[in-house]
Image (cartoon, rainbow, N blue to C red):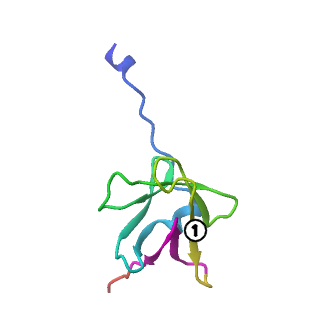
Amino acid sequence: ALEASAPRISAPAALPENLRDLIGLYVGEGSGVVLRVEWRDGKLTVVDAGNPPWRPMLAPTDDRDVFLIEPGVRQSGERAVFRRVADGRVCSLFLAAGTYQRLDVVASR
């Protein structure tokens, strides 16, 4: 009876391949604030370890690099825009009113 009444827990949605290159660390110009862009609960999410309650989720638009901040945070309805360099790599994130530079992983030898 307990097994029959237990809630079903399903695996979260997998990270879509077209969002993979957006995931990573971004640092605020001038502020030094580090944000993590993650895939959480089936949504692209911005995390600031210094402000855990602030966790904007980004809703896709018709442009692969432009998202809208979903309701639930002060910046709701604002745009989040990922910018790319000429070779297509993501180099920054403009989030509501500030720009965050992407920190690239450096492989060690």
User: The C terminus appears in which quarter of the rendering?
Assistant: bottom left
Residue at 39%, 26% (x, y): give it.
Answer: 7
Residue 5 position in % (x across, y down)? 38, 18
Most extreme residue toward the left, as rendered?
50
Residue 34 higher or lower than 29, as above or below: above
Overall secondary structure of the magenta section: strand
- Taking 63 as reference, is 31 above or below it? below
Q: In which quarter of the image is the N terminus?
A: top left
Residue 74 vs residue 79, the one in the foreground: 74
Q: Is residue 42 above or below residue 4?
A: below
At a point 55% along the width and 78% down the height, the residue shown is: 89
Q: Depth check: 11 or 52 in front? A: 52
The x and y percentages for residue 76 are: 52, 53
The percent position of residue 22, horizontal first and vertical second, equals 51, 67
Total numbered labels placed on residues in the image: 1
10 Å neighbourhood of mark 1: few (<14), some, or many (≥20)? some
Please state which of residues 47 and 15 is positioned toward the viewer in this rendering: 47
Examine the structure image and report whether residue 101 is included in the region drawn in magenta: yes
What amino acid is labelled 1 in the image? Val
Name the residue carrying label 1.
81
Task: Please provide percent x and percent y for residue 78.
Answer: 56, 59
Outermost right residue: 62
Name the residue nearer the viewer: 94 or 64. 94
The kind of secondary structure element at disc 1 is strand
Residue at (45% x, 76% y) in the render: 102
Task: Report the span colored magenta.
Answer: 88-105
Residue 8 placement: quadrant = top left
Quarter location, residue 82: bottom right
Residue 75 located within the stretch drawn in magenta: no
